Amino acid sequence: MIDPAAGPFLFDTSAEGWLARKDNRDAATWLRRYLRLHAIAVSAITVTERVRGYSILWRRSVPEVRTRIEAARVAYLNQLGLVRVLPVDSAVAVVAGEIIALVAEPPTPPRRSHRLAESRQDRLVRWRFDGLIAATALVAGMPLIHNNAADFEAIRSAIERTPERFPDLGPLELIRCSLLA
Amino acid sequence: MAHKPDTLKRRTTLTLPADSLLRAQKIANSRRVNLSTVIAEVIAAGLQFESAKQRTDQILDNYRKAFSGFSADEQAILDGVMLEPAATHRPRRPK
């Protein structure tokens, strides 16, 4: 188990969702202990991904369902006043550019479910968002908590292979959600 | 001269458990400060803890409202995975 006192951590989009939905007493206890010591920190990119998600669900829904989605979106927006949102500033943009150039293609294919699929274009967008989130963690010097090992391990390995492109930064410290509790 | 709000003090009477009061008095004696100083520090720490607890409860409540009631596919979309209805490929008819 990861000691909450070892934070603060940056929470990837996948990790924030995992912790918020996890129907597990240990995970809830871990989050409570963490919140006593630190604020939840997320990248501005996570906010973009999340709000884009609410917007797409809202557009695809019938009017009766839209009210529920809008209520969830408002709860998420209220949350933004209580968490720390790290910006994509010039330093993050420079490091993200290096990461995206280093690993141009996503390491795994687009995601599929029973009847739905992610387009190649959206997979590439998500991969570049991951590069921006990893860059945010590197620049902030914060370990990144994630539930997306395939993408972030690929980024971590690439950074380790070319440390000269990331002077005074790194390595990218990764923590899987499953290790939290 | 105007006082800053955070330096204002008020006298009041409190009824406290005797053992807590005794422990506070011992701390005051050991630090060579008066009892009021120790009680004020303890109250400030308690209020800070209560404020952090309320903030934590608010964050957890917001997360519950923001993420509950969605299917697995909808949760994936909220996590940035833009799933769309998969294109169905019909086999071509032979000419």
Image (spheres, grey):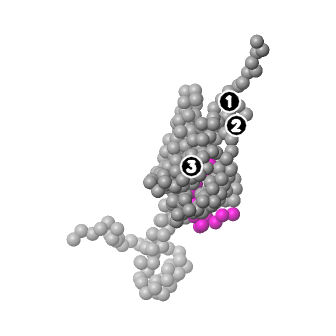
Looking at the image, can residue A27 be seen?
no
Checking the image for residue A154, the label placed there is none
Residue placed most toward the observer, A58 or A36: A58
Q: In this picture, is A42 found above or below A34?
A: above
Which residue is pictured at 68% across the width and 41% down the height? Answer: A109
Residue placed most toward the observer, A88 or A90: A90
Distance between the alpha carbons at the discs numbered 2 and 3: 23 Å
Contact, CB < 8 Å: mark 1 with mark 2? yes
Amino acid type at circle 1 is Ala
Instruction: Residue at the far right: name it.
Output: B94
* Disc 2, SS: loop
Q: Residues within 10 Å of mark 2 (few under 14, many from 20)?
A: some
Residue B79 x, y percent position in the rendering: 60, 44
Instruction: Residue at the far left: name it.
Output: B1
Distance between the alpha carbons at the discs numbered 3 and 1: 28 Å
Residue B80 x, y percent position in the rendering: 59, 42
* Disc 1, SS: loop
Checking the image for residue A112, the label placed there is 2
Amino acid type at circle 2 is Arg
Q: Which residue is mark 3?
A: A100
- Specify the segment rendered in magenta: A1-16
Residue placed most toward the observer, A66 or A151: A151
Q: Quadrant of the N terminus of chain B?
A: bottom left
* Disc 3, SS: helix
Q: Quadrant of the C terminus of chain B?
A: top right
- The chain to which mark 3 is attached is A
Distance between the alpha carbons at the discs numbered 1 and 2: 8 Å
Q: Nearer the viewer, mark 3 or mark 1?
A: 3
| Whether labels 2 and 3 share one chain | yes
Contact, CB < 8 Å: mark 2 with mark 3? no
